[in-house]
Image (cartoon, coloured by chain):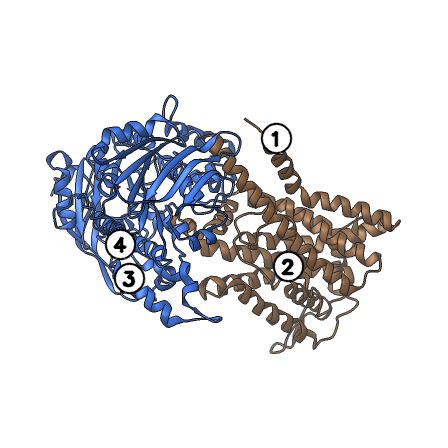
Amino acid sequence: MKTKKTNSNQLLMTILKGRTFIVLVILVVFFSVVKDNFLDPTTLTMIAKHVALYGILALGMTFVIITGGIDLSVGSVVGLIGMLAGGLIQYGLTLKFAGVTLYFSVPVIVLFMLAAGALIGAVNGLIITKLNVAPFIATLGTMYICRGFANLRSGGATFSDIAGYEGLGNTGFKTLGSNIAGIPAGVYVFAVLAVISVVLLKKMPFGWYVLGVGGNEKSARLSGIKADQIKILVYIISGFCAAWVGMINTAQLSAAHPASGDGWEMNAIAATVLGGTSMAGGSGTILGTVVGAFVIGVINDGMTMCGVSEFWQKVIRGLVIILAVVIDQTQRNLQAKMALQARNENK
Amino acid sequence: MSDKANVVLHCEKIDKIYPGTKALDGVSFDLLRGKVNVLIGENGAGKSTLMKMIAGIEQPSAGKMYMDGEEIYFKDTTAARAKGIGIIHQELSLFPNLTVYQNIFMRHEHKKGLFLNDKEHIAGAEKILKRLEHEIPPDTLVGDLRVGQQQMVEIARNLIQDDLRVLIMDEPTSSLSAAEVKVLFKIMRELLAEDISIVYISHRLEEIMEIGDHVTILRDGKYVADADVKDIELSWIVENMVGKNTQYHRFERSIDLDKAEKILEVKNLSLPKKGGGYLLDNVSMYLKKGEVLGIYGLLGAGRSELFECLMGMRPEHTGEVVYNGENLKIKSVSDQIKNGFAIVPEDRQRQGLIQTLDICKNTSIASMRNYVKGIFLNNKEEENAVDEQIKDIHIKVADKKLPILSLSGGNQQKVVIGKGILTHPTVLLLDEPSRGIDIGAKTEVFEIIHDYAERGLSIIVISSELKEIMAIADRIYVLSNGKCTGELSGDEINEDTLVRASYAGLGTGVSA
């Protein structure tokens, strides 16, 4: 027997579940009203570029947070990979002992960089699982280490005008930063990675194992799931995503700064949390993260366009994250209440 | 022991050594084929440890295992599973954040190529749940289910294994109602017919006599005896388990309860159910000072909810509560603790203990305000109080700074009771205080209850074990489907009346 309260609960639940999307719509409407060039193709393209960058990082972060962990190193990995990629293109790999400098083609560099990102992720995973260091601490450490190496690569300088050399056949990197059919390349990468993530998380046993490890690690081990392996894999995914972002970002700027990506881990976490992934682990969706990334992108660029100072932007971003988590708890409590109700109805 | 042909798994002189204890000492065990092999023993006897070896959760320190005559070694649960060994854990190993069908098919996923075949998962889950007569929607999150339903999901998980040969069931009925247990036994008999061998660990002695074929008894990590169930009686089991002849004996009360005053009275207590109906429907009861009052009833009758109302967890309840002669407005748990109420909840692991804290903190945590000097915690006072309490209720503790989980189930329960007692309550509420603990510890818990009642503490005990409640309660109320259907005292207390009253509030058939 459904009472008025049940129906109003269900309505509230639907609103809560779609809250991030509703917020996104409200924000877009708001900014387009305040800034009449908000919906221009140039603006939207700029926003899309940023959404793709935060979004790809957030995809990897989603897997990590679902297992109950966190990856603070992604921003630094973005910077480090950017420096390595830029350096390889402009200056190649010098082998002192042989007296040669090797230059690699762009596709090869991309593969190397992805492998490097995955490797850093694996190191994170190993430190966490084999050395029993808490994810927060472990990735905080690698965050500093990677940032340090990024700066060491160039002694703090920027590699500018990254274009490669015709004669060496390593041009073409900027494709990763340009528009293809009017849409930034990064967006395509984001879309593809998002689809792959959905398949991994929802359509493959791996997804069950990731959720299982996050929901109840003890049960996961008792079920025969290799929890350590799963954890290492999610950090590898995160590192892999960070590598993509490092390269796309460098390509977009045609320059590699050692400070690239500074603070981007926070955007990734914010997007993930806004999308409904719980910091406690055990739940999360890729779709939610994608919408969350859009929200972050729109808020950031919208505020900049309105001339909001960088400092106020930080305040607002912080408030948004807290609000997101509070609303998430409200949704969970409501869900538990509704479940209790359903149980009692069936008694 | 038994002849080779009907032994599906044989353990030969198994040792298991943990730092500080020898959990298993030269235990040899025969798992008879196609039979319900009951494994029984007090807590610490080694039954769960032995099962961990068989299920591949851990490996023996010494000794060998044989299956079908061949020597086997399980380096992990996957290896054991590959040989057809499944285990239903006592502490459920489910994923509360995943759906029923995900839990059931975890590690036994049906795939279409590389991808999960959820259609088959849902159909398969429906099929097995139907067989278990527990039709839960397969897409429900397990965390939203009641404990009894969760236990069914845990059972279902094991039943979908095609090549299951041995099923280990560790206290599978501890959260099930009588009707659910009947269904489970029916399924077990079907499994036996399919040539599946069962190991059944339970403390419910009556159940063992009903469903068991062969009994093996362990004590202190050693094998004691084994026999066919048809050849023995309950008393033989208890004798060998405990080493002495124990029956639940009725305690003599020195207080004249007829003359005792009412300390707590509940009038027309009602607790509405969300969505219509009542969890508690105009329940009226009273408790006398120094009395041990029993509350008997089936799962879902409203017993725990009664406690929750009294303890301040259900501010939405209606009705009058009179305490010490005055009307009591129940607002919050901390208020109720201040008013002199203490509760020992049903779910020891999740509601009674804090698993990450040590024994000392678990005992003192509800009464912390008593050990505070200014703004600081007076460690000495806290520890003294805990030491005294530990002594008073005879908790077997080597060092109270050890983690709480290092204690056996029975001793953990005593800690939870001790925690309540340290708040110096006037009314102590015990919800299934002897659930999941062995008979030796159970008797000790009964003695604790009797002892404190003699000292003037008024106690209410919820129990679903007839013999138990008949032994410790001075007077019994029966709850059925939220209503109070019986009040029995003295000679009125007998099994027949109690059971009938527990069904009286239901419509046709059994609920829950």
- Between the residue at mark 1 and the residue at mark 4, the CA separation in whole angstroms equals 51 Å
The label number, if any, that marks residue B265 in the structure image = none
Say which residue label 2 marks: A242
Is there a contact, CB below 8 Å, between mark 3 and mark 2? no
Q: Chain of mark 2?
A: A
Closer to us: mark 2 or mark 4? Answer: 4
Q: Amino acid at mark 4?
A: Arg
State the separation of the CA atoms marked 2 and 4.
67 Å
Location of residue B91 in the rendering, given as x and y in whole percent from the top left corner: 36, 47
Would you say residue A40 is visible in this rendering?
no
Q: Amino acid at mark 3?
A: Ile
Q: Label 1, label 2: how many angstroms apart (C-alpha)?
A: 48 Å
User: Which quarter of the image is occupied by the N terminus of chain B?
Assistant: top left
What chain does badge 3 belong to?
Answer: B
Query: Percent x, y for residue B441?
Result: 23, 51
Q: Which residue is mark 1?
A: A4
Picture residue at 34% right of the left edge, 36% below the top? B176
Considering every residue shown, the one lying at the far right of the view is A36
Task: Measure the alpha-carbon separation of dots 3 and 1.
Answer: 52 Å
Q: Dot 3: few (<14), some (14–19), or many (≥20) neighbours within 10 Å?
A: many
The answer to whether residue A51 is visible is: yes
Outermost top residue: B508
Q: Chain of mark 1?
A: A
Give the mark nearer the N terminus: 3 vs 4: 3
Callout count: 4
Tell me which chain appears brown: A
